[in-house]
Amino acid sequence: MKKIKRLIIFLLSIAVILSAFLPTTASAANGRYRIEEAKLEVTIPATYTVITRNTPSNAEIFTRLGLSYSAFMSNMKSGSIYLDAVSDSHSEEIVFTCQENIISDFSLLSDTLLNTLATTTINEMEKLGISVIKYDIYHHSQAKFLRIYWSDSANFRYGLQYYTVRDNTAMNFTLQSYEGSINSRQESVMKTVVDSVEYDTASPVVSEGEDTDSFVYTDSDIGIKFTVPANWKQDEFTEDREYLSAKFVSTKEDGCTIIFAAVDAWAELSPSEKIGLSRADVDNSIFTKADIAEMFSTTEDDISLLMYNGVEYYKCTRTADKEVYGLSLDITMTQLLCVDNGWMYAFQFNGKEDHKLYSDFEELVRSVKYPTSQTTTVYDDEGEDENENENKLSYTGNKIDNQSVNSLIIVVLILLIVLLIIVVFFIFKKKNGKTSQAVKHCMKCGQQLPVDSDFCHMCGTKVEKGE
């Protein structure tokens, strides 16, 4: 299967890269144009001169502008261009391109999956020196378009690009401005052009998904429960996951997932690492924003603290590059982390705050009822449990004052890796923090020694530095 760079080449209009080298044209009459290769018709305003691959070689425009018909057509073919419309002022042009594509139809993709592709596409555009200003999804009566505003400072161009995929064909309508950023008139012109497009066949019928009621999810082993919003259902993992507890998928938005995971970080510590600590000591306060940023290989600017229903969470929104069936996709995730009473809880949503279902994610997190310990377990110098009633759990509505289609598989794997990193980081932090400074042992007999000992008082062995 072709890699994502091949996909991006298909998705990106070659006009974005090459159209600066196209010859300038003059104006022609208003009209409706048929593009057989794309199985569509489109209307171009009268203020633009249009050249298509069907324009005859003896057309007056070639003579009037001194253009070589053969050279012009060669440029159109090499650039996969089927229509080039230039304004009367020569300050802007509209270019239509189309090529084969491995995707069947954008209309079959949910907005979630299309935005995933969009993120990857935009990253590739920026590698080519094209800066993306903003983008959104535009719903045409027969197609779903990704609408991108971009700038190309090296060639003094601004662009407004609509692209879609239909019948395994990527199609781009791109307006390029050579005299400043895209203005409201140009936006109106492009919307009118795109709205005038009529395809030979109707758009594919997409299922609206099933309606489901909200329900309460309970994990008695962990001691946690929360309400899953309406139109979400629990789904099975493709294989057993040690730290991933539950996966929920939207019944209305294909590819939209919420993952819940929990790790007993306290249980990962050895008895010697627990000396002087209680389970209740292990909470959000042991981490800083810098710690969380280090875990996620990002910067502190990407980490924030926020509260849901009285519970404090570290929030991280990040993008990871993962390969899915031969395609390298940029998966954007929002992760909420909460450490309480020795447990680390994580909630993940594959999207950002601007996602239309992000409010469902927040609704779920607000409903969480965490378990809290009714007793405090403190370990003595031998690492022994002084309280036999450790970890009796009860539900509470608030955290105690002292302190959350194919791309789904990848999202699960990413969170698994993140959780493993966090567990390892936590153990490392404790080993190299206050616990490791409280005690050391003789490497020969194992006797516990004061931290400043030079010799073992039990067997007489010299204590090397670093032991």
Image (cartoon, grey):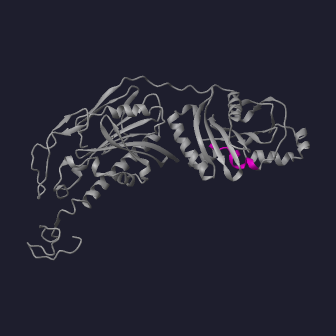
Question: Residue 217, relative to residue 19: is it above or below?
Answer: above
Q: Start and end of the magenta stretch?
A: 11-20
Where is residue 247 shown, x and y percent of the image? Answer: 36, 36
Quadrant including the C terminus? bottom left
| Residue at 71 percent of width and 31 percent of height | 193
162 sits to left or right of 379: right
Where is residue 59 shown, x and y percent of the image? Answer: 89, 38
Q: Nearer the viewer, residue 185 or 245?
A: 185
413 sits to left or right of 284: right
| Residue at 46 percent of width and 25 percent of height | 209
Would you identify the image quadrant in which residue 201 lies?
top right
| Residue at 36 percent of width and 47 percent of height | 416
Question: Residue 70, relative to residue 60: is it above or below?
Answer: below
Where is residue 168 shown, x and y percent of the image? Answer: 62, 37
Question: Residue 205, relative to residue 346: is it above or below?
Answer: above
Task: Determine if the magenta segment contains residue 18.
Answer: yes
447 sits to left or right of 79: left
47 sits to left or right of 102: right
Task: Determine if the magenta segment contains residue 347.
Answer: no
